[in-house]
Amino acid sequence: MQIERIIAKGQLVQLTFMQDAVAASQTNVQLPIAEVTSAAANAVDSYVMPFAGEVIAISAVTTAAATAGTLTVGATKDGTEWADPTLSITTAQEAWDTCPRGTALFSAGDQIGCEITSSGTWDGTTADLAVSVWVLLYLDGI
């Protein structure tokens, strides 16, 4: 019997971000990786990537549906939002988007985060938000 040392060339990883009670009139607010319902909030808002890779999807869920306004959600690299993938949430509690491979590339050491913008008419202000940014880490060469 022959044993071979084989490793996958990539690994799909879920990065989680959240906000408690999504307020109206927010602009490009970086989401923390964890938040609590009190004055003490987690100020960490990104993950440092140990390998090069790419964002391939984003998904979100809220605890309650809004009836008016818009909430946009996008993945960021070093605080700058990519144009794709992004979400535009109105009255749905769940949303997701994928992007073509090669669209949202990052290098080892880049910080991957997530930001939101809510319109002034957003009325889902009692809803909590959880966002998953799905990244493919390139493992070939290790």
Image (cartoon, rainbow, N blue to C red):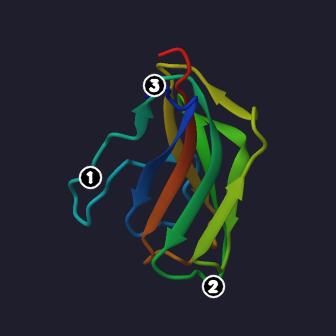
Residue type at tag 2 = Thr
Task: Give the quadrant of residue 9.
Answer: top right
Residue, disc 3 = 2
67 and 86: which one is in front?
86
68 and 3: which one is in front?
3
Q: Is residue 81 above or below residue 111?
A: below
Which residue is painted at 50% across and 73% down in the image? 62
The quadrant in which the N terminus is found is: top left
Q: CA distance from mark 1 to mark 2?
A: 27 Å
Which residue is painted at 70% across and 63% down in the image? 88
| Left or right of 31 in this view: 54 | right
| Left or right of 105 in this view: 45 | left
From the image, state whether disc 3 or disc 2 is nearer to you. 3
Residue type at tag 1 = Ala
Q: Position of residue 113 (x, y in %)?
A: 50, 40
Residue, disc 1 = 41
Q: Residues within 10 Å of mark 3 (few under 14, many from 20)?
A: few
Q: Position of residue 26 (x, y in %)?
A: 54, 56
Q: For the residue labelled by badge 2, is the local secondary structure a helix, a strand or a loop?
A: loop
Residue, disc 2 = 67
Q: CA distance from mark 3 to mark 1?
A: 53 Å
Which label is found at residue 96?
Answer: none
Q: Position of residue 68 (x, y in %)?
A: 66, 80
Q: Are marks 3 and 2 in contact (CB under 8 Å)?
A: no
Task: Give the quadrant of residue 106.
Answer: top right
Q: Are marks 3 and 1 in contact (CB under 8 Å)?
A: no
Which residue is painted at 53% across and 28% down in the image? 78
Q: CA distance from mark 3 to mark 2?
A: 61 Å
137 and 39: which one is in front?
137
